Amino acid sequence: MVAEPETTSTAAGRVQATGVDFYYGQFRALKEVSLTAEPHQVTALIGPSGCGKSTFLRCLNRMNDLIDGTRLTGKVTIDGHDIYGPDVDVVELRKAVGMVFQKPNPFPMSIYDNIAFGPRVHGVRRKSDLDEIVERCLTKAALWTEVSDKLTQSGLSLSGGQQQRLCIARTIAVDPEIILMDEPCSALDPVATAKIEDLILELKDNYTIVIVTHNMQQAQRTSDMTAFFMEGRVEELAPTQDIFLNPRNQKTEDYISGRFG
């Protein structure tokens, strides 16, 4: 188990996993994972395919609950509250912990309705309030100037990079504390990727961000902390600069230098 950096954060959105094991049936996909993600920081999860980083990410908003035969032991807390406790409302949890997926997945509805959908579900009905939310979220997602004159068009009519920013805007429309991103740029070209990376750096002012990426340059550019996963374990968790310039673990050094993975 990897020792965690000491912290004194009191801001909302602190994620802490302690001794987490996760099973798909009999297969143990995560092994004693302990990791903290702090507010106003980007924490990157890197490692070879199948090492458990996406499984861990989905533990943070209980998306793995949707898969039959899965089981978690250990503890995951947000702001000190056990998110696997018996009194947890999973719908409210996923409101607080938004997720952006590998492939852009806008709803088959207008750009406006993509953003307004979540607030409507949570009881916002007044059009002026919805208008304000749509503009604010599209602005935060660096998309407003590109789509403000075509809000009635389908979200599916946008380019891939625009669709992914639309999905980010949709995620923040319900005021989460935490944003999870599972390889959000893997389907995008370099120009669109750069826009998403710039957006991540802006969003961390307001959110805790945890990102899974296979792109180690992306981890270096966007993250404050990096966790290196291998075979279901966190081999090293440290400030990103230390991971890439002065790794303490030989497995980390071998991975980032391209010896495997």
Image (spheres, grey):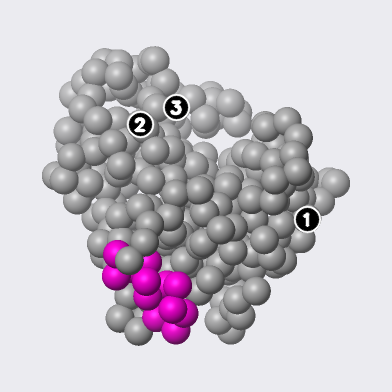
Residue type, label 3: Ala
Q: Is residue 252 magenta?
A: yes
- Residue that sits furthest to the left in the current view: 191
Mark 3 vs 1, N-terminal side: 1
> Which residue appears farthest toward the front when viewing the image?
259
Residue 224 in view here: no
Q: Nearer the viewer, residue 240 or 86?
A: 240
Which numbered disc, 2 or 3, marks the residue that appears first in the sequence? Answer: 2
Residue 233 appears in the figure: yes
Q: Which residue is mark 1?
A: 73
102 vs 42: above or below: above
The residue beneath circle 3 is 116
Q: Is residue 223 left or right of residue 32?
A: left
Instruction: Judge left or right: residue 211 versus residue 76.
Output: left
Q: Between marks 3 and 1, how big is the CA–CA gap?
A: 36 Å
**Quarter of the image with the C terminus in it:** bottom left
x, y percentage for residue 63? 62, 39
